[in-house]
Amino acid sequence: MPIDSGEVINKVVRPEAGAVSTFIGIAREFTKGKRTLFLEYEAYVPMAEKKLAEIGKEINERWPDAKTAIAHRVGRLDISDIAVVIAVSTPHRADAFEASRYAIERIKEMVPIWKRENWEDGTEWLGDQLEKVAGEPGKESAGSD
């Protein structure tokens, strides 16, 4: 199901916030010159939700006035479809920018979501979102700590 970025943003809008920073990750057509036709994401949902909540907790420890909402899509994504939306509100913009960046980096480090690249000339499962480890859902853990 597509992600409604407006819904994610509305979860963090509040009177005491002077800034809302959003990060929207989308499916790109070319990676290092190689053409992607579409992507597929799979997740171990209970653990992914737990890890996303941990990221929210980490953000609140670093930026106590922040409020964070994150949505990550699973399933097939066509080029330019939204894969992830992060919204962070804080009283001031610098904290919102920093916390938003922190969230996407932590997602790639620790959330068990697998991505299958469907290239023009084949497919490849990526076992971590840093795209350094090959792996298939159910066979290897992605983004473990």
Image (cartoon, rainbow, N blue to C red):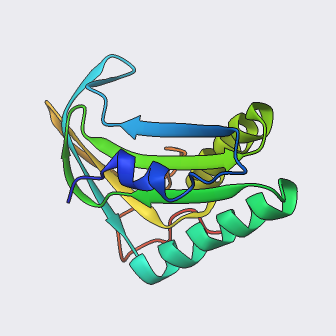
Residue at horizontal 85%, vertical 56%?
62
- Residue at (25% x, 32% y) in the render: 80
The front one of 67 and 75 is: 67
Determine whether, in the image, residue 83 is placed left or right of residue 81: right
Q: Is residue 103 above or below residue 23?
A: below
Locate residue 95 relative to residue 130 in the image: left or right. right
Q: Position of residue 72 (x, y in %)?
A: 40, 57
x 70%, y 39%: residue: 18
Q: Is residue 127 visible?
A: no
Q: Residue furthest top?
A: 33
Res. 133 visible in picture: yes
Query: What number of labels is visible?
Result: 0
Give the quarter of the figure containing the N terminus.
bottom left
Locate the C terminus and report the quarter of the image it occupies.
Answer: bottom right
Position of residue 119 measured from the top left corner of the image (x, y, whole percent)? 20, 35
Q: Camera-side residue: 74 or 91? A: 91
Residue 109 image-quadrant placement:
bottom right
* Residue 123 percent across, percent down from the top left: 21, 45
Residue 82: x %, y % from top left: 31, 42
Q: Is residue 50 left or right of residue 101?
A: left
| Rendered view: 90 above or below 72 | above
Find the residue positioned furthest to the bottom: 46
